[in-house]
Amino acid sequence: MNVDAVRSYCLTLPQAKENLQWGETLCFKVNGKLFALLSLDSVPPRLTLKSIPERFTELLENEDIVPAPYVGRYKWILLQRLDAVPWGDLQELIEQSYALVAKKAGRTRRPAKRKPKRAAKARHRN
């Protein structure tokens, strides 16, 4: 598998968009939230994805998969090479990352409760 295959697959997901950020990093987003980062400036290219918590530790047993820098504590993984897992497994990991992020990105935030404004004092005209 290669960068083009990963890029094409990410863009098949509903509402997925891409843009180039942080130098040579291709970012894939759903509703403005990142679900995959593909580093084009590293050799070999690297892929960062959000993992489901139940698989995070299991994935780290692969020597080519490590916790992603800065966001590993949130169960993001870094595949140090695109062939770290078979293509079918990689597609599944991309779909899981997308689903986790899309679920959160689709939620609308409740507006903060505001204190009621004080009633304006009625002015009396004499």
Image (cartoon, rainbow, N blue to C red):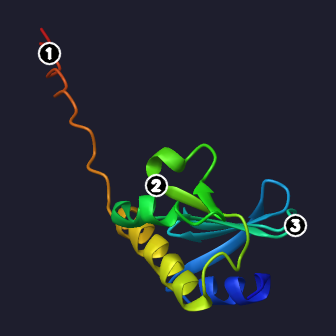
Element type at mark 2: loop
Kind of residue at badge 2: Lys
Image point 40% across, 66% down: which residue?
55
Whether the residues at callouts 3 and 1 have beta carbons within 8 Å, the answer is no
Kind of residue at badge 3: Val
Give neighbour class at mark 3: few <14, some 14-19, many 20+ (Cα, 10 Å): few
Residue 75 is tagged as 2
Where is residue 118? Give x, y as percent.
Answer: 16, 20
Which residue bears the numbered disc 1? 121
Residue 14 is tagged as none
First in sequence, mark 1 or 2: give its number: 2
Figure quadrant of the C terminus: top left
Up/down of 71 relative to 36, above or below: above
Which residue bears the numbered disc 3? 43
Q: How many marks?
A: 3
Element type at mark 1: loop
First in sequence, mark 3 or 1: give its number: 3
Up/down of 94 relative to 64, above or below: below
Figure quadrant of the N terminus: bottom right
Q: Which of marks 1 and 2 is in front?
A: 2
Nearer-the-camera pick, 122 or 63: 63
Element type at mark 3: loop
Q: Distance between the residues labelled 3 and 2?
A: 24 Å
Image point 49% across, 86% down: which residue?
14
Please give left or right for residue 5 compared with residue 67 in the image.
right
Give neighbour class at mark 1: few <14, some 14-19, many 20+ (Cα, 10 Å): few
Where is residue 6? Give x, y as percent.
Answer: 68, 84
Where is residue 15? Give x, y as percent.
Answer: 52, 81
Where is residue 119? Give x, y as percent.
Answer: 14, 22
Give neighbour class at mark 2: few <14, some 14-19, many 20+ (Cα, 10 Å): some
Kind of residue at badge 1: Lys
